[in-house]
Image (cartoon, rainbow, N blue to C red):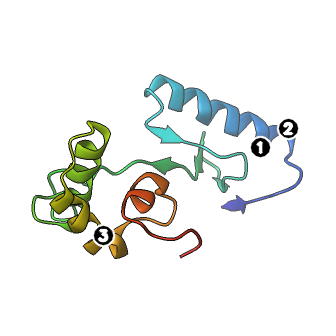
Amino acid sequence: MKTSKKTTRRTNREREIINIAKEICIASDGEIEIETTAKISEGDDNGAFIQGWIWVDFAGTGLDKNKPGTPQARLEYLRAELRAERISYGELNELQSLAKYIQPDDVELREAAGVPENH
C-alpha cells in the first residue's frame, strides 16, 4: 500500500483523489474536512484512504467543557451577561477570579476581566 503526504507538488492522480474526497465532504454537509496536504493511502483495491478532519462535539458527554459548574460554563454565562449589558459588579469580580481560565485569544472576556494585554 502506497502512502503519500506531499506539501509541495501533487500528481494529477493525487489531486483527483483529493477532489473526489472533497466532493464527498460537500455531500455530507461539510462534516468532514480534507486538506490539500492530506495523506493518501492507495492500494490495489478500487479506492483510497485519505486523511480528513471530523468535528467531535463534546456536548452532553463526559468531556463537555460547558457542563454546569465548570469554569468554562460560568465564563459563557458571564459573557452573555456582559453582552446584554446587565453584568453586576459581583459578576465582574467573579470574572476577574476566573481570568486564568479565559483563552488567550478571547479579547472580549480578557478585557472585561482587566487582564493586561500580552499576559
Residue 90 is at least partly visible in this image: yes
Q: Is residue 65 visible?
A: no
Q: Earlier in the sequence, mark 2 or mark 3?
A: 2
The quarter of the displayed image where residue 95 is located: bottom left
- Report the front residue among 73 and 9: 73
Spatial CA span between label 2 and label 1: 6 Å
Q: Residues within 10 Å of mark 1 (few under 14, many from 20)?
A: many
Q: Is residue 102 left or right of residue 64?
A: right
Secondary structure under the numbered disc 1 in the rendered image: helix
Q: Residue at 43% of width from left, 62% of height from top? A: 110
Residue 55: where, in percent of width, then height? 40, 48
Circle 1: residue type: Glu
The mark lying in front, picked from 2 and 3, is 3
How many residues crowd mark 3 within 10 Å: few (<14), some (14–19), many (20+)?
A: some
Q: Which mark is residue 96?
A: 3
The structure residue drawn at horizontal position 29% and vertical position 45%, both measured from the top left corner, is 82
Q: Which residue is mark 2?
A: 12
Residue type at the position of mark 3: Gln
Circle 2/circle 3 CB separation < 8 Å: no
The secondary structure type at the circle numbered 3 is helix
